Image (cartoon, rainbow, N blue to C red):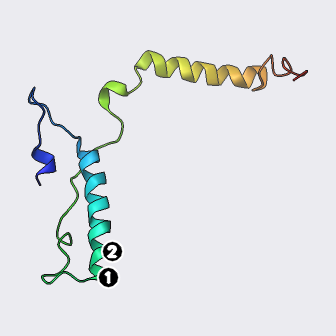
């Protein structure tokens, strides 16, 4: 597909696979709608177009480190000890 092969001046991909899939989905929906109202002579043009396979939505560089995960788990353990309530929950009582 042409969208998938488009590159910027520096040689990197212009759009991610998820973006290409989103654009393709919109085009497929639009072509299907047109085909219902005024059928294409050769059939639905987007019927055989498939979506790109996309891996996990979580990017590797955005994943939590072991230290960050441990801090979150430690904070969750502390919630059990303090009753799971904020100590300053009545701070804005006058508002």
Label 2, secondary structure: give it. Answer: helix
Q: Position of residue 78 (x, y in %)?
A: 68, 19
Residue 54 appearing in the image: no
Label 1, secondary structure: give it. Answer: helix
Q: Position of residue 10 (x, y in %)?
A: 10, 26
Quarter of the image with the N terminus is bottom left
Point out which mark residue 37 bears: 1
Residue 16 in the figure: left or right of residue 95 = left
Q: Position of residue 75 (x, y in %)?
A: 62, 20
Give yes or no for contact between labels 2 and 1 (Cβ–Cβ under 8 Å).
yes
* Furthest-front residue in this view: 38
Q: Residue at x 80, y 17 (%)?
A: 87
**Residue 94 found in image quarter:** top right
Residue 55 in the figure: left or right of residue 88 = left
Q: Is residue 82 above or below residue 9?
A: above
Residue 70 appearing in the image: yes
Q: Nearer the viewer, residue 90 or 41?
A: 41
* Furthest-right residue in this view: 94
Quarter of the image with the C terminus is top right
Q: Position of residue 39 (x, y in %)?
A: 23, 83
Q: Nearer the viewer, residue 10 or 34?
A: 34
Q: Residues within 10 Å of mark 1 (few under 14, many from 20)?
A: few
Q: Residue at x 48, y 22 (%)?
A: 69
Point out which mark residue 21 bears: none
Dot 2 corresponds to which residue?
Answer: 33
């Amino acid at each position: 597909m042409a969208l998938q092969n488009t590159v910027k001046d520096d040689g990197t991909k212009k759009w991610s696979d998820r973006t290409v899939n989103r654009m393709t989905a919109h085009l497929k929906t639009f072509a299907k709608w047109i085909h219902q109202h005024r059928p294409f002579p050769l059939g639905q043009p987007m019927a055989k177009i498939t979506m790109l396979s996309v891996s996990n939505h979580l990017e590797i560089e955005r994943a939590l480190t072991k230290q960050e995960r441990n801090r979150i788990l430690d904070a969750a353990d502390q919630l059990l000890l303090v009753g799971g309530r904020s100590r300053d929950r009545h701070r804005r009582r006058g508002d």
